[in-house]
Amino acid sequence: MSIEAHLATLEKKHFALEEELHEAMTRPSYEDENIAEIKRRKLRIKDEIERIRSSVN
């Protein structure tokens, strides 16, 4: 997989987690622990995206 394709995949995952997080935060029955886990996954993906971009430049 090329770096560009990998970045595109990561960006899609990040966007999907953003949507999942937004939905979770609008539902009062959603557990805070689940919201925190979504945020952690989103942050890990964001960090990986930034790491890849900085290694390319």
Image (tube, rainbow, N blue to C red):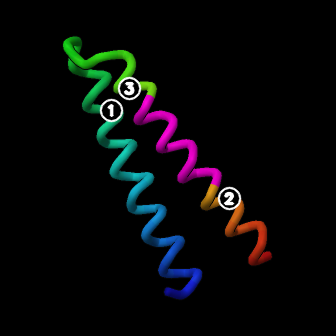
Identify which residue is drawn at 25% across, 19% down. 30
Mark 2–mark 3 Cα distance, whole angstroms, equals: 23 Å
The residue that label 1 is drawn on is: 22
What's under tag 1, amino acid-wise? His
Q: Counting residues from the N terminus, which is met first, the one under dot 2 or under dot 3?
A: 3
Q: Is residue 14 above or below residue 37?
A: below
Q: Nearer the viewer, mark 2 or mark 3?
A: 3
37 relative position to 31: left or right: right
Identify which residue is drawn at 41% across, 35% down. 38
Q: Is residue 17 magenta?
A: no
Specify start and end residues of the magenta stretch as a single range: 37-47
What's under tag 3, amino acid-wise? Ile
Identify which residue is drawn at 39% across, 62% down. 12
Identify which residue is drawn at 68% across, 59% down. 50
Pointer 1 and pointer 2: residues touching (CB < 8 Å)? no
Q: Counting residues from the N terminus, which is met first, the one under dot 3 or under dot 1?
A: 1
Q: Residues within 10 Å of mark 1 (few under 14, many from 20)?
A: few
The residue that label 3 is drawn on is: 35
Secondary element at image label 3:
helix
34 relative position to 54: left or right: left
Considering every residue shown, the one lying at the far bottom of the view is 2
What's under tag 2, amino acid-wise? Glu
Coordinates of residue 3 in the picture (x, y in percent): 58, 81
Coordinates of residue 43 in the picture (x, y in percent): 56, 42
Coordinates of residue 20 in the picture (x, y in percent): 30, 39
Q: Counting residues from the N terminus, which is met first, the one under dot 1 or under dot 2?
A: 1
Q: Quadrant of residue 17?
A: top left
